Image: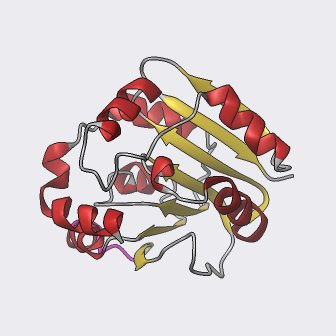
Amino acid sequence: MGQVDFFNTVAKNWDNMIEINDSKINYLLSKLEIKEDDSILDIGTGTGVLIPFLDKLAPKGIIRGVDISKGMLEVAIEKYGNRSNITFDLVDIENDEINNEYNKIILYSMYPHLENKTDTIKKLVCNNLKHNGILMIAHSNSRDFLNNLHSNADKRVKDSLLLEVNEQKQIFQNAGLNVIEAFENDEMYYVVIHKK
């Protein structure tokens, strides 16, 4: 529960703590090839950082934001809860069942916080991604930046670290996942998985 407590504590101030870089986010989301009527699962939605970007790309679609932090979701609902195509739910994707399937699943700025990373991603692809769907792990910062940030942050998130992207790709491939792109530089980090 340590991470949940941490995110609940910082939720009200989260939007002031983070940098939202529109061009990086739009570039990352372009890798998902979102269609206007796609169903999208935004895992670790937090305060809904991606919601306006996703809503613009899929105005006729359904967007579901899920998070383990009630505090974060309260902020997201306050900001975007009045839109009919957007829902928010308190979900622990590692332990709770998600009964729906989606065209696109994104884990933006949250993947390192998973405990059972590979198993969770495989479960999402197998159970919750539609045929020909895409799952993406994305960060609009570099691995070094994020690992340094987490290592020196609150002890509840200090072990939330990213692997070198090709090492991560290999782990996913060894688990039977179809990784179509894996990239990192000093600006961003992402892995794209396609379900055949």
Q: Is residue 82 magenta?
A: yes
Position of residue 12 in the picture relative to residue 133 (left or right): left
The answer to which image quadrant residue 3 occupies is bottom left
Which colour assignment does the render follow?
secondary structure
Q: How many marks?
A: 0
- Magenta segment: 79-84
Residue at the extreme top: 186
The answer to which image quadrant residue 73 occupies is bottom left
Please provide percent x and percent y for residue 113: 45, 54
Please provide percent x and percent y for residue 163: 57, 34
Position of residue 56 in the picture relative to residue 119 (left or right): left
* Rendered residue at 74%/41% (across/down): 171
Q: Is residue 52 above or below residue 181?
A: below
* Rendered residue at 23%/74% (across/down): 74
Q: Is residue 10 above or below residue 174?
A: below
Q: Is residue 118 magenta?
A: no
Q: Compare residues 183 and 87 and report the one nearer the observer.
A: 183
> Quarter holding the N terminus?
bottom left
* Rendered residue at 72%/35% (across/down): 169
Position of residue 139 in the picture relative to residue 96 (left or right): left
Q: Compare residues 82 and 156 and report the one nearer the observer.
A: 156
* Rendered residue at 29%/74% (across/down): 81
Please provide percent x and percent y for residue 71: 23, 72
The answer to which image quadrant residue 2 occupies is bottom left
Please provide percent x and percent y for residue 112: 48, 47
Position of residue 18 in the picture relative to residue 29 (left or right): left
Prevalent SS, magenta region: loop
Q: Is residue 33 above or below residue 37?
A: above
